[in-house]
Image (tube, rainbow, N blue to C red):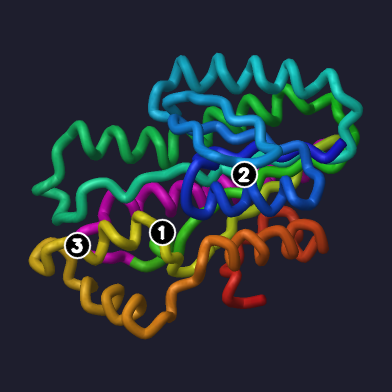
Amino acid sequence: MNIIIITGGSKGIGKALAEKYAQENYKVYSLSRSIVDLQNVTQISVDLSDTKATHNTFKMLLDEVKKNDISSITLINNAGRLGTIANIENISSEDITKSIQLNTTTPLILSSLFIKETQHLTCKKQIINISSGAAKNPYEGWSVYCTSKAAIDMMTRTISAEQNELKNGIKCNAIYPGVVDTNMQTNIRNTDEKDFKNLQRFIDLKKNNELYTPEFVAESIYTIDTQNKLNNGDIVDIRSF
């Protein structure tokens, strides 16, 4: 059995990934607050910004999953939030905390559990982190988001280095999906330009039909994954394929 666990599988890239892998006969699990209409996907409702609930829910899921005869198992850390778009001094402590929790702390917790609970498995094991070009490029108004994604890239590199030393180690990669036509993009375009100086660029991308669809991104990630195009620790942009 090929198993894939996706966070934030109820919308955007996460939903498209869940649908794509389900179509390819993977056993797909989605961890998300919302339950939506998804065929052949086991949806588990959990608030991923709640540390205790996240830990307990994921541990129970892994305990259940391990009862199967597993050919491959993958965790896709996809869930995230942009948070308030503004200069750092105009973002509340609560909003900063929530963004870092969901974008960085939760993937660290899930990755830790995933590695620990699957260390006895000798099948294909991997973590795919959905990162962003914002990890490398500073955008004024996105200080928290950029910081959280830079942390994801370093997490990817560090985990891959640790796992390289192990006999049954997992493969860990990060993928930049490009600029995708999701609710996050809608929120960006509705921002006041005084809070986000790059606003016009994103408005133009939408107007010129230059945004990727979530389905295209999911198809690309599936191809990169199943054709084993990545070495452990690689951090790639789907536009380079």
Q: Earlier in the sequence, mark 2 or mark 1?
A: 2
Q: Report x, y in % for residue 28.
A: 70, 38
Labels 2 & 1 near each other (Cβ < 8 A): no
Q: Is residue 151 magenta?
A: yes
Q: Is residue 92 above or below residue 64?
A: below
Spatial CA distance of label 3 from label 1 is 13 Å
> In which quarter of the view is residue 38 placed?
top right
Q: Which residues are magenta?
A: 138-167
- Residue 141 position in % (x across, y down): 20, 59
What secondary structure is the magenta-colored segment mainly? helix
Q: Secondary structure at mark 1?
A: loop
Q: Identity of the amino acid at label 3? A: Asn
Residue 167 makes an appearance in the image: no
Image position of 40 with respect to 210: above or below: above
Within-10-Å neighbours for mark 1: few <14, some 14–19, many 20+: some
Q: Please name the residue shown 49% across and 68% down the image.
A: 178
Q: Which residue is mark 2?
A: 76
> Quarter-wise, where is residue 43 in the image?
top right
Q: Which mark is residue 190?
A: 3
Residue 64 vs residue 204: left or right?
right
* Quadrant that contains the N terminus: top right
- For this view, does 62 lie left or right of residue 214? right
| Three-letter residue code for mark 2 | Ile
Q: Mark 2 vs mark 3: which is more N-terminal?
A: 2
